[in-house]
Amino acid sequence: MEKIIEQIAHCIEFGKIDKNSPFPPDMKGQDGADELVKSALDSGIKPSEILSDGMIAAMEKVGNKFTQNKIFVPQMLMSAKAMSKAMLHIKPYFQDGSVQQKGTFVIGTVSGDLHDIGKNLVSMMVEGNGWNVVDLGVDVSAESFIETIKQYPGCFVGLSALLTTTMVSMEKIVGEIKAASPDTKIIIGGAPVNQEFCEKISADAYSPDPQGAVSSLNKLLAA
Ligand code: B1M
């Protein structure tokens, strides 16, 4: 593997966004994911190679470390920020078709619920795994999900809920999406929900964390 791709992966894994970012302290003053991805593209390395061997591979490591409690929310956010900044250089190649995305993932926090920190982490991890993510934000109604599903045929949907009271909204939204679009696959997550609830409301998968959401999506895509 090209050395610069290994450096990009290192920056994303440890949250080195760009040259000016002070974190992590042992990389102060060095190029970050932003500059390195630009240099790699300028030197003619394929964007798809930078994305899959450097950026996505690093985010997978980050997701696994988070699942295993080896890192926590702040470190994961720094990695996700490095990924997002680097992704700005790769995005034009999605539009011209030289980098293929896996599909579209429509995500939102269910109606009545304003918590978005976990949902944003899921959103960033899924984007970092090569999906087009449409993030509808918080307090999202069934109608809004259904309208968006129409705009992105074949998309997958993610619902997040943090309140026991909004688990009711989640159940209602799953029912309405399935009635309007029976083939749409729905992944649910958030602190109060679990596998048992997932089965009760007939969602397609439950994930306890962002890496789990990525794995569930990839499994549903392959099925
Ligand atoms: Co609220 N809040 N809050 N709150 N809040 C909780 C959730 C609560 C547990 C606190 C408590 O009482 N101990 C409690 C819920 C109790 C319950 O229902 N069982 C609660 C309450 C009651 C409330 C209010 C009702 C308080 C009030 O006004 N009386 C109110 C409700 C507002 C509303 O939504 N309508 C409220 C408001 C707020 C703030 C606005 C102040 C703020 C939210 C800010 C924001 O999100 N932008 C807030 C916060 C920050 C919290 C706590 C402290 C932290 C939540 C969080 O971000 N965790 C929380 C207590 C706690 O958890 N310690 C609490 C970190 C985040 C990374 O974890 O979101 O669980 P989490 O996401 C995880 C997984 O769940 C998973 O991945 C993430 C990473 O592992 N995941 C998914 C999440 N979505 C997923 C989707 C997937 C897959 C995985 O696939 C699609």
Image (cartoon, rainbow, N blue to C red):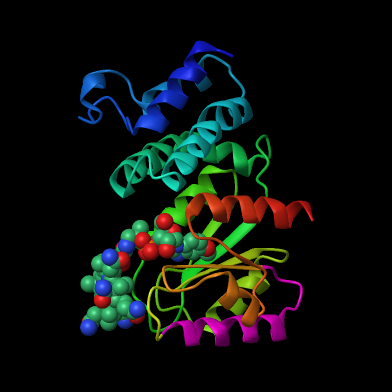
- In this view, the residue in front, 199 or 174, is 199
Q: Is residue 108 magenta?
A: no
Q: Position of residue 19 (x, y in %)?
A: 27, 24
Task: State whether residue 142 is above or below residue 103.
Answer: below
Residue 185 is left or right of residue 128, and the answer is right
In the picture, which quadrant includes the C terminus?
A: bottom right
Residue at image location 22% in from the left, 28% down from the top: 20
Q: Which residues are magenta?
A: 166-185
- Quadrant where the N terminus sits is top right
Task: Residue 119: tell me if it is visible.
Answer: no
Q: Quadrant of residue 8?
A: top left
Q: How many marks?
A: 0
Q: Relative to 148, is 26 above or below?
A: above
Q: Among all residues in the image, which is located at the extreme right?
A: 223
- In the displayed structure, would residue 36 be above or below residue 176? above
Instruction: Write down the quadrant of residue 78 in the picture.
Output: top left
Report x, y in % for residue 110: 46, 77
Q: Main secondary structure of the magenta part?
A: helix
Foreground pick, 114 / 136: 114
Residue sitting at 43 percent across and 83 percent down?
166
Residue 163: x and y, percent? 37, 79
Asked whether the viewer can see residue 45, the reply is: yes
When the figure is inspected, residue 218 is found, relative to residue 107, above or below; the finding is: above
Direction from residue 3 to residue 22 in the image, left or right: left
Q: Nearer the viewer, residue 24 or 130?
A: 24
Image spot of residue 115 (x, y percent): 34, 70
Image quarter where ligand 1 lies: bottom left
Classify residue 204 by image quadrant.
Answer: bottom right
Is residue 177 one of those drawn in magenta? yes
Image point (41%, 32%), residue name: 12
In this picture, residue 185 sits left or right of residue 193: right
In-image side of 166 versus 157 (left or right): left
